[in-house]
Image (spheres, grey):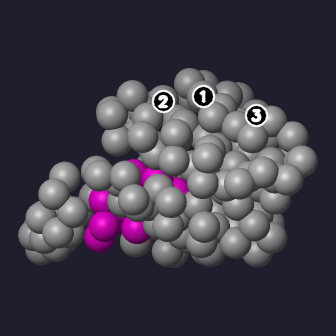
Amino acid sequence: MKIALASDHAGFELKEILIKELEEKGHNVSDYGTYSNESIDYADFAYVAARSVAEHNYNFGIIICGSGVGVSITANKVNGIRAANCCNNEIAALARQHNDANILCLGARFVTVEDAIEMVDTFMNTKFEGGRHQRRIEKIHDLTGC
């Protein structure tokens, strides 16, 4: 799979670990920054990664900040993006099954590395259920015009 990753300074170390994990599993990973733990504005990096996913250059995106909230708000400003801020594996699965989420947002200050790796695997390997959920996704898209 092709995966776009981005983070702010708080998520930098977790992003680096996830990139290594994903590449070891054979995935094609693009790093949209940041490239250090020096303070930056998360929106600058989250938006670019989200756009790349919306343009269908990647199967999924993973965006990380301290809480996951700021990057999820930013990513969801991009038409075609359904970014889910997940804090456990069950929510990561439901984000895919019920919401057809295409970007996983993580809060580096609130998840362990092990939990983050598990959520990434679950997110990437869980299929959208469609059915009644498809109608709801279409309503969301109608609201945003995407």
* Mark sitting earlier along the chain (1/3): 3
Marks 1/2 in contact by CB < 8 Å: the verdict is: yes
For label 3, the residue is: 20
Residue found at x 33% / y 34%? 55
Tell me the magenta residue range: 95-105
For label 2, the residue is: 2
Residue 3 visible in rendering: yes
For label 1, the residue is: 30
* Mark sitting earlier along the chain (1/2): 2
Mark 1 Cα shell of 10 Å, populated few (<14), some (14-19), many (≥20): some
* Spatial CA span between label 3 and label 2: 14 Å
- Image coords of residue 51 (percent x, y): 42, 40
Q: Does 41 sit left or right of 140 as displayed?
A: right
Say if the magenta span includes residue 63: no
* Mark sitting earlier along the chain (3/2): 2
Q: Does 111 sit left or right of 131 as displayed?
A: right
Residue found at x 21% / y 63%? 144
* Numbered marks: total: 3
* Spatial CA span between label 1 and label 3: 11 Å
